[in-house]
Amino acid sequence: MEARTEEVEEKRQEEIEEQRLRERMEVVVEENPQLEIEEEVEEDKQRQRLEIHRHLQGEDRQAPAQKIHERQTQAGREVISMQRSLVAAHISPTLVLFKLSP
């Protein structure tokens, strides 16, 4: 029971640290949009490291619905990232998304 409490507290601390980092990065991103793309890449790397760490510790017991939500969120981030890249390249993102949609 005590180990579970420690896990919950550790997870909460990680979430607080991530939120603080995001808040700091938002200020910098306003000055340079390219940093936001780099930030997303770094978040993905951190998330992957954390998933590997949890898996190695046998803590990969997430509910299937949560995993699906995470995949959908990641897919949404990828679309947004693609849109930003297209805008930076002066290509209409709605035109590309229209062509990509089934």
Image (cartoon, grey):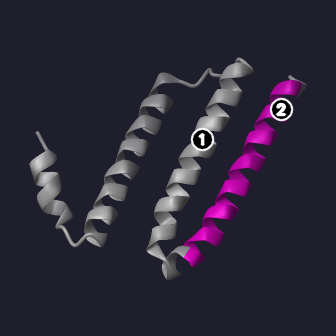
Q: Decide whether residue 18 is among the magenta residues.
A: yes
Q: Residue furthest bottom?
A: 31
Can residue 59 be seen at all in this image of the molecule? no
From the image, tell me which residue sits under label 1.
47
* Front residue (pair 15, 36): 36
Rendered view: 69 above or below 30 = above
Residue drawn at the location 55% of the way across and 60% of the way down: 39
Residue 26 in picture, x, y percent from top left: 56, 72
How many labels sit on residues? 2
Instruction: Specify start and end residues of the magenta stretch as a single range.
Output: 3-28
Image quarter of residue 57: top right
Q: Quadrant of the C terminus?
A: top left
Q: Residue furthest right?
A: 2
| Distance from the alpha carbon under mark 1 to that under mark 2 | 22 Å
Name the disc covering residue 72, or none. Answer: none
Residue 22 in picture, x, y percent from top left: 61, 63
| Label 2 CA crowd tier, 10 Å (few <14, some 14–19, many 20+) | few
From the image, tell me which residue sits under label 2.
5
| Label 1 CA crowd tier, 10 Å (few <14, some 14–19, many 20+) | few
The secondary structure type at the circle numbered 1 is: helix
Residue drawn at the location 51% of the way across and 55% of the way down: 40
Left or right: 6, with 69 as reference point: right
